[in-house]
Every structure is written in structure tokens, then in C-alpha cells.
């Protein structure tokens, strides 16, 4: 179960106060981590792709809500949230979100594909990254209408054996689809958390597939619009959905006796300042900036800026020449916490006038077992190195996460992370009211991970390997180590 955007402290207090008994039961009988980490940018498409594949953005090719496609000279927008995209978004955004991201841009195999390789069927409810070996036809008549003569959308998507996305796609008729394909884009298309819980419960009750991924997105939206305390109240409702799924197996005891379970969030949330929270990237002194859904270099811009909530990807016409200069200008700006860029095989970071650079290699080791060569002023990332160990401060897993963004050719030449309280907003020019995410800072980077029957993942990139190891050991009698070996090969 992926619970979009729920902060670890919010989940912990809800369980502690008795407002989340179902999730609490999983934590009590299994284990809970309150400092698991997301990827950078800590934003839904990048994070859900990481959960579904076990790879950081450099391995998935999915960097955020939006990125600049150099080959096509265009901004690719996946949209902030599936429901927003479908209710208000243009067809092209729907296309990018549902078709392009999975089919064309995602470069790593998904858990659904990996499980299929070892003969394990899967079901997916609402999770945005769902590529798999089975074709699923569009079930909505309005979408079928758009298909005629459009260069966007197509009559089907590929997914796991069972795939559900509101009234758009459903591989099994549970009689829970409200509108039988007549919802239309301006009305609900049945994509909501209540429906996800209903389908999740049916999948469990009828033992449709050995592996099920159910996604709840509303807790993220609640935080964006109403803040963290509203999200805390929402967790009680969310727990009801989880409870419904467990009840479908006959209750907590029966559910946990039959199933291993992981509940995890994809990213955290950072409260925004009531005023002056928006950091506008339209102007950078000495450079012509192109910003927005139609941004590109064709009109003579020096910088194409792509905001992604509390992160921003900046693409430079004459990179690497002006990269350090742009990073220096922007890292001093109010609301910009740090700037990062590639530098001859290193990743460099600048924050409050301090600079450091690092690369994977023989050197100090962090708590995740990765070792790093580090040069310059460690305080630029709040990193402490002592006795051969790297200790992180306000930027959890900072080295691996920055590397996992900057190493992608789709990443900007300069990548920004916002200060607490601030946001770069969306490609559309809008920005959220109460809270946002995307940065390297722990507020929006830390997630909870609760598991029973398998270890609770330390990072969201551990989720897919944990699931794969579980099925391979259980169902096929093959050791997880052997598969890890093959994957390396
Ligand atoms: Zn969000």
C-alpha cells in the first residue's frame, strides 16, 4: 500500500493516539521506520517510479512532474495528480501521465514485469507506475471518442494481470464502477480512495493475485490545500481504508497470517509560509529564462527552467560553461536552499556560500553502506565525516539522492532545492497553498515505512527488491541472493 505524501510524524502520532488501529497493528506485529527516505526530487512521479522499480530517478528516467526533453525541445508534463489531470488537464497531459510515462519514458523494469518473469501475477489499483506484460483496453466511451484521429492516447495500456484506474481501466468487473464509462473528463471518473479501498478489498477477498499494489492519493492533496494538521485528521479515514482491505481477509489476524504487507509513503510534506512562499525563476540576472509549459531554447533563451514543487530543474544552453555561475547566482536567492550540478565526474553543491563536491568511490561510508569521495566544505550539505563514517543532518541520504538525480541526462544542468517554507510552484505558474514537497530537506524527504512479514524498507528504492525477494524465496524456492546476482549480470 502506498499512501501518498503522508509524513512519518503524522503517521506515528495517529498510531500513537489510537487513530490508526489497522496500520498500528501492522507496525506492532512487524516493524516501523519513521526515518525511511524518498528520492530527490521528492515528488510523486519520481518517487512512485522509484517504488515500482527500485531505482532512483537516474535509473528510471522519471525526474518529476515535469522535465525538458532536449531531443524534442519541449517540456514534458505528467501533471501533478492523476485526478487533476483527468478532470481539468488537456489531453496531452493525460496522454503523458497514463501512456507516455510508463510506455516511453520509464527505462527500468517495474515490479510487475519482474514478478511476471518469475511467474507471479500481480494487481495494481491506481498506482501511476504500472507497466506490465498484459494489455488493458480503455473502458470509457468518452476516451474512446478522443482516440479517433488523435496523435495522443491509444486504445490500451500495458499493466499487470489485473489493473484498475477508476472508470478508465478495470480488468475485472466488481460491480463497483459507478458510471460504466460515461463519466467524462469534467466529472468524476471514479478515481478516488474509496474506490481503491473497495477494489483492494475485493482483490484480497477473492485472492485474485499473489501481489497487490493499492495506492491512496488523497492524503497528499489534503496537505497541499489544508496543511499538516488536516493530513493528521485524514489519516483516520485512510486507516479505515486499510482496515477494509484487512477485513476482507477476515480481520487483522487472518490478513497478517496469510499476507506479508508493506505500507509506505512516497514522499513527505513541508509546510509553506503564508506569504512570499513562491520563488519565481522567471528572472536570473544576466540570462534570458524560458519558463512554463511551452518553454524551450528555440526563442533564444539561455536557461529553460522547470519548477517541480520544492525542486527545480534548470537546463542551460551553454552548459557546462555557465553552470557554476548560474548556481552561484541562484543559491544566494531567498527561498533557494541549495544548488547542485555535475562537474567532471563529480556532483557539486553550493549552499549559503559553501561548496563541496562528491562522487561514489573509496572513502567514508554512510548508514546505507554507500561509500563516497568528498571534497570541500561538508557543511554545504550538513554532512559530518568522522572515523570513516558519513553522518547526515537535515538532508537524509543526501549524497546518494543528489547523485540519483544529477546522474540522469534528463536532469537539469543545475538542480535547485527550496528552503523550508518555500516552493518553485508548478510548470503552470501556480503554486500550492499550505504545504508542498520536492526538496532534499528531511521535511519532505522522510517517509514512514511499516511492514509485517518482510523487513520495513529503509529507502523507497528498497520496496521493489524487498517484494521481489519475498516472492522468489516463497513461491519458487530460489534464493534471493541468486536473483540479485543475476540482476547485477
Ligand atoms: Zn503532492
Image (tube, rainbow, N blue to C red):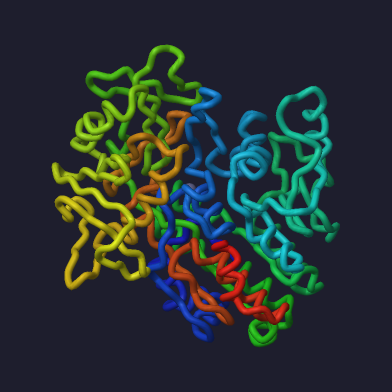
Q: Quadrant of residue 89?
A: top right
Give above or below for 89 relative to 126: above
Point out the image quarter for the N terminus.
Answer: bottom right
From the top left corner, tell me how far across and down residue 247 is, in percent.
70, 78
Q: Residue at x 27, y 24 (%)?
A: 284
Q: Please state the horizontal and vertical placement of residue 376, each as a whole percent of the image.
A: 16, 50
Q: Residue 268's spot in the image, x, y percent?
A: 42, 57
Q: Of all residues shown, which one is farthest toward the top?
A: 299
Return the residue nearer the eye: 217 or 53: 53
Does residue 237 appear in the picture of this structure? no
User: Is residue 353 rendered to the left or right of residue 29?
Assistant: left
Taking the image as shown, residue 206 lies to the left or right of residue 306, namely: right
* Residue beneath the point at 43% across and 18% down: 297
Q: Quadrant of the C terminus?
A: bottom right
- The residue at 76%/66% (across/down) is 121
Q: What percent of the width, then of the height, locates residue 6?
A: 47, 60
Q: Is residue 446 above or below residue 308?
A: below
Task: From this view, report whether residue 436 is shown above or below residue 282.
Answer: below
Amino acid at each position: 500500500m502506498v499512501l501518498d505524501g503522508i509524513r512519518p510524524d503524522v503517521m506515528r502520532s495517529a498510531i500513537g493516539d489510537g487513530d490508526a488501529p489497522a496500520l498500528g497493528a501492522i507496525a506492532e506485529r512487524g516493524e516501523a521506520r519513521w526515518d525511511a527516505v524518498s528520492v530527490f526530487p521528492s515528488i510523486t512521479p519520481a518517487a512512485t517510479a522509484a517504488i515500482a522499480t527500485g531505482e532512483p530517478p537516474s535509473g528510471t528516467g522519471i525526474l518529476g512532474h515535469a522535465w525538458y526533453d532536449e531531443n524534442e525541445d519541449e517540456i514534458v508534463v505528467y501533471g501533478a495528480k492523476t485526478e487533476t489531470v483527468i478532470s481539468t488537464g488537456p489531453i496531452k497531459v493525460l496522454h503523458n501521465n497514463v501512456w507516455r510515462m510508463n510506455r516511453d519514458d520509464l527505462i527500468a523494469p517495474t515490479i510487475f514485469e519482474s514478478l511476471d518473469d518469475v511467474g507471479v501475477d500481480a494487481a495494481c489499483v491506481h498506482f501511476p507506475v504500472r507497466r506490465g506484460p498484459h494489455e488493458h483496453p480503455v473502458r470509457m466511451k468518452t476516451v474512446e471518442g478522443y482516440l479517433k484521429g488523435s496523435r495522443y492516447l491509444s486504445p490500451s495500456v500495458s499493466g499487470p494481470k489485473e489493473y484498475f484506474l477508476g472508470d478508465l481501466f478495470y480488468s475485472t468487473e466488481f460491480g463497483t464502477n459507478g458510471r460504466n464509462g460515461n463519466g467524462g473528463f469534467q466529472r468524476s471518473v471514479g478515481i478516488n480512495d474509496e474506490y481503491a479501498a473497495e477494489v483492494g478489498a475485493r482483490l484480497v477477498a477473492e485472492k485474485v493475485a499473489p501481489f497487490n499494489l493499492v495506492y491512496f492519493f488523497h492524503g497528499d492533496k489534503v496537505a497541499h490545500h489544508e496543511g499538516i494538521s488536516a493530513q493528521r485528521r485524514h489519516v483516520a479515514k485512510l486507516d479505515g481504508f486499510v482496515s477494509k482491505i484487512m477485513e476482507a481477509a477476515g480481520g487483522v489476524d487472518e490478513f497478517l497470517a496469510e499476507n506479508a504487507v508493506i505500507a509506505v509513503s512516497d514522499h513527505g510534506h513541508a509546510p509553506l509560509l503564508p506569504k512570499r512562499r513562491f520563488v519565481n525563476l522567471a528572472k536570473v540576472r544576466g540570462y534570458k529564462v524560458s519558463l512554463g509549459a511551452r518553454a524551450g531554447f528555440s526563442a533564444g533563451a539561455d536557461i529553460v527552467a522547470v519548477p517541480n514543487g520544492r525542486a527545480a530543474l534548470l537546463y542551460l544552453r551553454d552548459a557546462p560553461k555557465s553552470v557554476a555561475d548560474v548556481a552561484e547566482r541562484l543559491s544566494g536567492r531567498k527561498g533557494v536552499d541549495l544548488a547542485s550540478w555535475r562537474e567532471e565526474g563529480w556532483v557539486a553543491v553550493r549552499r549559503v556560500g559553501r561548496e563541496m563536491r562528491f562522487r561514489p568511490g573509496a572513502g567514508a561510508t554512510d548508514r546505507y553502506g554507500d561509500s563516497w569521495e568528498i571534497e570541500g566544505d561538508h557543511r554545504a550539505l550538513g554532512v559530518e565525516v568522522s572515523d570513516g563514517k558519513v553522518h547526515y543532518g537535515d538532508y537524509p541520504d543526501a549524497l546518494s539522492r543528489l547523485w540519483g538525480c544529477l546522474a540522469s541526462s534528463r536532469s537539469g544542468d543545475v538542480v535547485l532545492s527550496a528552503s523550508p517554507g518555500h516552493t518553485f510552484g508548478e510548470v503552470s505558474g501556480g503554486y500550492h497553498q499550505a504545504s508542498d514537497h520536492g526538496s532534499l530537506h528531511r521535511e519532505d524527504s522522510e517517509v514512514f515505512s511499516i511492514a509485517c512479514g518482510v523487513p520495513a524498507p529503509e529507502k523507497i528504492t528498497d520496496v521493489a527488491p524487498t517484494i521481489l525477494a519475498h516472492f522468489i524465496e516463497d513461491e519458487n524456492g530460489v534464493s534471493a541472493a541468486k536473483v540479485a546476482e543475476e540482476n547485477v549480470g
